[in-house]
Image: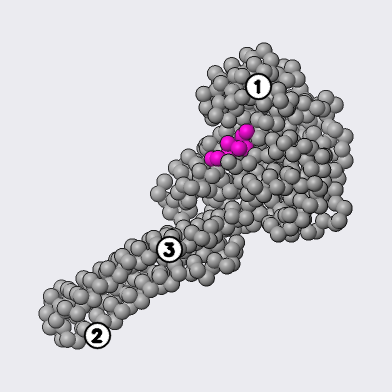
Amino acid sequence: MVCVDLTTCPTFWASLGAGLSVLLSAIGAGLGIGISGPAIAGAGVERPEVMLKTFIATILAEALAIYGLVVGLLSIFAIPSLTTIEGGTRIFAAGLTMGAASLGAGFGIGAAGSAMASATAEKPDIFSRAVISLILAEALAIYALVTALLLVFGAK
Amino acid sequence: MVSDTLSHLLRDNYLIARLRGKRSNLLQRQQLIALSESKSQTEIIGLLAEGPYGPELSKLGGESSTIETERAVRLGYADSVMSLIRASGGDTHEFLVQYRRRFDAYSLASLVVFKAQGKTWEEYLATRLPVALIKEQELHRLYSLDDVSTIAREAGDRHLVERVKGFSMTDIEGERASLARDIINGWGEERFYKYVDEKLSGPDRENCLPIAGSAIDIANLTIIIRSKLIGASGVRDHLIPSHWKLNQRAIDQLLAATDTLQALDAAAGHEYYSRILSGARQRYEESKSLSFIEVALRRYQLDLSKRLFLGFPYSVGIVLAFLVLKENEARNLAAVLAGVAAGLPTDELRSLLALQE
């Protein structure tokens, strides 16, 4: 499809959405890993036995980038079949939802993961309870993932 | 305030995780009580072999002296503090440097007392805490000086020179030596307090002020009471001009006391410090020593530190809280080692320990 006016071009909006999904999710994942990573390393220096367990924070943060990539790729695959501006804006909204939610979740995972690693270094038995806040932060991104997928699959 | 918290979150989480890990290795109340019941220094070294003091203690020979063992404990403490300093950055690093400056005053105070007691440089060096910023070479040079004012001028500032006026190497002995030590240590505490009060802000200041503030107040209180004990005059000149909760009115009241017991009663009745100094007269009459004031301050600071660990973690308060706990552990261990070596009864030895409830 050749677009004359970008503001009404479905391909433009869908591409922007796909890009935002990957970009913002990657920033969110970077924040999560960047904030929790040093705390995990610090906990590992003092208590090497807890380091592997506390790595869950970086794994959960990395998952954010994967959610963003999934939404981004599905958006790109949907672009050739787009015929209306509504379809394009749906994909844009999906990308923005996924990206912005990942950004927030990434910060949450970073802060909660850092506190979890510190707490586990001090009291290893606390890990199973401290990890709950981390999972709740991750859940925020999963809500966005579900919403984004529904938006992408409904785009025409 | 938000930017301070964010910078601690982004920059200090490695340090905070490490010190939380280190906190779990601190000796617990029960362990210290068990150590105080030990029969010999060798038994204590054996009990500590697995902990953070193990590496330094393992270097000691079979028949090491109490001073050597105490030094090993100090080195273990210093190693712990220095590893935190190396792991820190930005404002937190600056905070730790300011914290280390307190030890310059401790080094200087013991230098003056050791010198006045006619002890050798080697004897002094064995007790020195390596956390201090002041270099060993500089301390050696200061040790060759014979005048307290000159030492204060060379290593301190005009405030310290003013405060030690009237002291000379020939009259520093017994309680007067303790008074000189209190004055110099108080000068160090004041520098740290001023840094906390003037340079920190938000939660950093709020969390650190009670610890730094109580230290200067209790330093002033001790100087006044010790002066009463030895009948020294011109006490005002030796006092720290800054104050936290022990304001000018309270200081005037303490200075107006006719003797030590009356001053202790006034301290025990203070609206803020009554919480740590209640029953001060009785405690003094039982021990015939003012060391209970220092122990009471340490216990109070332990409580504050414990509360800081339970609160919001992203401030330098938590770093200071850990340092208070670690310093207290080293002091407790030094007291146990000295007490066991001197054959002190267990009850008497325990009264010298600041233990967490």
Q: Residue at x 59, y 16 (%)?
A: B253
Q: Which image quadrant: the C terminus of chain B? A: top right
Q: Nearer the viewer, residue B11 or B28?
A: B28
Chain containing mark 2: A
Q: Amino acid at mark 3?
A: Val
Determine whether, in the image, residue B210 is placed left or right of residue B161: left
Q: Amino acid at mark 2?
A: Phe
- The spot of residue B51 in percent (x, y) is 69, 57
Mark identifier at residue A131: 3
Q: Quadrant of residue B321?
A: top right
Residue B297 belongs to magenta span: yes
Which of pointers 1 and 2 indicates the residue nearer the eye?
1
The residue that disc 2 covers is A77
Q: Nearer the viewer, residue A125 or B109?
A: A125
The magenta region covers B296-304
Determine whether, in the image, residue B208 is placed left or right of residue A150: right
Q: Amino acid at mark 1?
A: Arg
